[in-house]
Image (spheres, grey):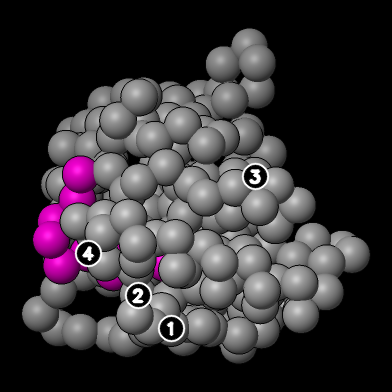
Amino acid sequence: MLLSTALDLRPSPDSTPVVAFIGAAGKTGLLLRLGEEMAAAGRQVLFTSTGSLPAELVNRVPFSLLTPVLSVVLFELPTSLRGYRLVLVANGPADAEGRLAGLSPQVVCRLAGLPDVDAALVEAGEGYQPPESGQPLPPCTTHLVTVVDLADHRLPPAPPAAPADVAWFLYLDLGPAGSRSDAQAAAQSLARSALDRAWPTPLRGVLIGRAADPDPVAEVMRPRR
């Protein structure tokens, strides 16, 4: 199953989906896959971070805008999206450690509001730390995905402050050796724990799959009380 299908990211003339990924390792690869899916479907996709991204992404996306000058981004982004569909935006070239600085949450929302942006994909956290510790969620976030390392069997932090109607999902990555049955048991446990905690952001589903597969989602489990 396509990741965009699992997250129910259907085109809408009334709103622009802003998808934020937090949690364990694998966020960048999943976001890139999601961007490629949506671009292949004809949508114009902004790819960025509120923290930092590996510089190697520049070689994996069709086009990049690497500048700290917001006016340049605002001028260039619409044309770039129309020409390349998937565009990486960062706050300047890579630093000495090979990282691309991300954008502030407010700038992400400003760019997501441009008429030529059909979707904005944001890596909004590093490791298991909640985004408010360093990479806050854009206030315009519509979809929140917490990536869970199945080997850890750890419940992630409570969802950070987000709009009340944000669609929140857990993503369980099976990795190279994980089995579907193990993932199903873990998904049920995680979903029950999340429901028991009565987190203010309701859990929409637990996605089970492998980020490295052509179709990264094998199953979607919906939580039940």
Task: Residue 199: say if magenta.
Answer: no
Front: mark 1 or 3: 1
According to the picture, the residue beneath numbered tag 4 turns out to be 166
Query: In the image shown, does 41 or 197 lie closer to the viewer?
Result: 197
> How far is mark 2 from mark 3, CA to CA?
21 Å
Residue 176 image position (x, y, % from top left): 87, 63
Are circles 2 and 4 on residues that touch, CB within 8 Å?
A: no
181 in relation to 147, above or below: below
The quadrant the C terminus occupies is bottom left
Front: mark 2 or 4: 2
Are circles 1 and 2 on residues that touch, CB within 8 Å?
A: yes
> How far is mark 2 from mark 4, CA to CA?
9 Å
According to the picture, the residue beneath numbered tag 1 turns out to be 222
Query: In the image shown, does 204 or 91 lie closer to the viewer?
Result: 204
According to the picture, the residue beneath numbered tag 2 turns out to be 204
The disc at residue 132 is none
* Mark earlier in primary sequence (1, 2): 2
Residue 62 visible from this viewpoint: no
Give the amino acid type for the residue marked by disc 4 in the picture. Val
**What secondary structure is marked by label 3?**
loop
According to the picture, the residue beneath numbered tag 3 turns out to be 25
Give the amino acid type for the residue marked by disc 3 in the picture. Ala
**What secondary structure is marked by label 1?**
loop
